[in-house]
Image (spheres, rainbow, N blue to C red):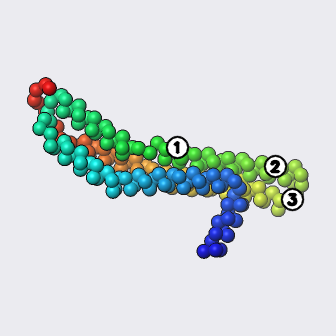
Amino acid sequence: MGQMIIDVEAFLETGGPVLNVIGLVTVVMWTLMLERFYFFYRVFPRVAEKAQQDWQARDDHSSWGAHQIRRLKVSELRMELEDGLAYIRVLVALCPLLGLLGTVTGMIEVFDVMAVAGSGNAKAMAGGVSRATIPTMAGMVAALSGLILSARLEQFAADEGERLADRLEIEHGGGDE
């Protein structure tokens, strides 16, 4: 365990301060995604069941007012399904941009070494090159993992919203309220 911590610290040091920011953004992004998975699979089924029971308990399913109540309920539940997904999309898009920032700061370090030591000191430039490439890689890996799971979350939210709307049956005909 101690060696793993030392290796992680060395990796973070090699990648520079931008790598710490990428790590923080990734942790926040994954926390939001895990919360959404928990909501979808643990909380939302009970919420949807309650909404369906409330709808079935109504006497009126066919009037204009009943249709509006149904639309409101479906809309509210879809908003609950989509809650937080926009933040996840923003964090996914932010990861490669932070990787690019790491690339730029690492290349600035390479240019500083070249200005001081000349272009013949390859060993001195290697630190800047690794500082430029590691955040890029980390940003892309974080973005790819987030992209795959956020697409799954968004598809689940859309599908579940449609299923919910189908379960709240309406009756056509009937009079005005």
Which quadrant of the view contains residue 73? top left
Q: Quadrant of the N terminus?
A: bottom right
Q: Quadrant of residue 27?
A: bottom right
Q: Confirm whether residue 144 shows in the render.
A: no
Q: CB of mark 1 within 8 Å of CB of mark 2?
A: no
How far apart are the alpha carbons under marks 3 and 2?
12 Å
Q: Residue at x 67, y 47 (%)?
A: 101
**Tag 1: Cα neighbours inside 10 Å, few (<14), some, or many (≥20)?**
few
Mark closer to the chain start, 1 or 2: 1
Q: Which mark is residue 159?
A: none
Q: Are marks 3 and 1 in contact (CB under 8 Å)?
A: no
Which residue has dot 3 on it?
Answer: 121
Give the residue pinned by disc 1.
90
Between the residue at mark 3 and the residue at mark 1, the CA separation in whole angstroms equals: 40 Å
SS of the residue under disc 2: helix
Q: Return the residue at label 2.
A: 111
The amino acid type, in three-letter code, at marker 2 is Phe
Q: Specify the amino acid type for callout 3.
A: Asn
- Judge from the rendering whether residue 55 lies leftward or rightward of residue 102; answer left or right: left
- N-terminal of the pair, mark 3 or mark 1, is 1
Looking at the rendered image, the disc whose residue lies closer to the viewer, 3 or 1, is 1
SS for tag 1? Answer: helix
